[in-house]
Amino acid sequence: MKKNFKFLMMSAAVCALSVGFASCSSDDDDNNSVNPNQLSETEQTIEVLTSTYVEDVVYATYTNLANAADDLYNKIDGAKAKFRAGTLAQGDIDAICTKFLEARAHWEASEAFLYGPATTFGIDPHIDTWPLDLDALALSLSNADQVAMLDDGDDGIAYAGAKLGQELLGFHGIEFILFRDGKNRTLASLQANESDKAFAGKTVTGEQELVYATAVAGDLRDKCFQLEVAWRGESAAKAHQDRVEECELETQIGSLYYGENMLSAKKAGSTYATWQAVLIAIFDSGCSNICAEVANTKIGNAWSGEDVNYIESPYSKKSFQDFYDNISSIRNSLYGGINLSSPSSKSLMALVQQKNATLAAELQAKLDAALSALDTCRKGTAFVDIISSGTRDANVQKAIEAINDLDDSLQQGASWASKL
C-alpha cells in the first residue's frame, strides 16, 4: 500500500543538483494540473535516478561487454594465425579463456535489462542459446566447404551469423572450443583431432575449430557492438558505431536510441508514457524477468528433470557463476552502479528507502539471501556435475527458493512504483 509523507519542497534546480534525491510533496499532482508539462518532484527524482541507471549501469555494462568481446575476437583470430604458424602456446589459450570469462561475466551482468534491444532485435537468443548442438557442429566442421566459408574474414563472420543458426552461435560455441571439463583447453588437445563423442567417425582438426571460433567470435563482437550502440547511440565508441553501420544492424526504436527513449519518458516519441512506467520496466520487465528465468528455467529445467541437458555453460562449468552474475545485474540496477557495496544516493533503491522503508528492507534482505545462496552453490560442485550424478544438493533448492523470494519482492516493487 502506498504511504503518504510530508516532505520539504525545493526547486527543480536544487533537486537535480543535490547529492541525494530531493523529497517529494503529496501536493505535486495538484501543482501539475496548472502545467501538465511540468514534472512533479517525484517525477524529477525518477528522472535523476533513471539517468544514473542508464549511464552508470546500462551504458557502462554494455560498453564493458563490447570492449571485452572485441578483445576476445582479436585474441582468437590471433590464435588461429599462431596455430597455423606453429607458434601457439598454452599461455595464449589461457589468455583467451580469461578474456572469454570476462566477456561472459559482462553479458550475464546485463540480463536485468534484456527488455531493450537484446530482445527486440533477437540478440539474446542469437548469442546465448544452449545447449550447443554438438551433432550439428560436428557435421559443420567436417564439411570442408563450410569451413572454407567461415575462414574468410568479415565474409566468414557474416556467413556464421546468417547460416549457422543460434544453436551453433554465440558464447557456448566458443566455450566448447576453449574449455573442457571445467578447465582451459590444452594445447595438446587442440593440436589433436577433436575427440568429443559427437565427432565420432569425423575428422575435425584444431585448426578447423579455431576457424569456427574466430567467425563466431566476430559475430558475437558485432552483436555486442549493436547492443552498445542501440543504447548509447552516438556516445558509443566511433569504431563500434562504424562496424554496426557497416553490418547494417538495427539500433533504434522509432527515431530514438534506447537510452534516449528511456530518458525521454513522458515526451513525444518515447515509448514510456510516464516516469512511473520507467520504474515498472526496471522492476518488472528487467529485474523480475531475469529472476524468474534463473530460478525456474536456468536452474529449474535441469533440476526438475524437465530437461537435464538444459545446462548453461557446461564446458567451463560456470553455471552458478552465470546465475550469480544474473542476480548481480539486479543489484546493479537497484543500486545505480556496477558492483557497488551500497546503493547510490541517486538510485532506485535510494528512492524506495526514502518512500517505503519496509519494502526497501525486504528487497535488500531478499537480494542478499539470493546472492548468498548462489555464492554457496558456486563454491561447491558444478551444476552440470550435480545434474549428471543425479544427486539432490540441498543448496540448489535453497537457491531456487531464495531467488523466487526475491522475485516476489521485485513484483511488489513494480506494484508500488505504479502507485507513485
Image (cartoon, rainbow, N blue to C red):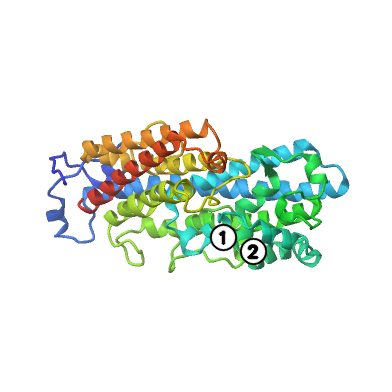
Going 35% across and 59% down the picture, which residue do you hit?
A: 264
Going 33% across and 49% down the picture, which residue do you hit?
A: 283
Residue 331, position in %: x, y?
40, 40
Q: Are marks 2 and 1 in contact (CB under 8 Å)?
A: yes
Which secondary structure lies at badge 2? helix
- The relative height of residue 89 versus residue 134 in the rendered view (above or below) is above
Label 2 CA crowd tier, 10 Å (few <14, some 14–19, many 20+)? many
The residue lying furthest to the front in this view is: 390
The quadrant holding residue 397 is top left
Residue 225, position in %: x, y?
58, 55
Residue at label 1? 126
Q: Marks 2/1: CA distance?
A: 8 Å
Please indicate, yes or no, whether residue 21 appears anywhere in the rendered image: no
Going 64% across and 64% down the picture, which residue do you hit?
A: 161
The residue lying furthest to the right in this view is: 85
- The relative height of residue 377 versus residue 310 in the rendered view (above or below) is above
Q: Amino acid at mark 2?
A: Gly
Toward the viewer: 91 or 394? Answer: 394
Residue at label 2? 161
For marks 2 and 1, the one nearer the N-term is 1
Label 1 CA crowd tier, 10 Å (few <14, some 14–19, many 20+)? many
Which secondary structure lies at badge 1? helix
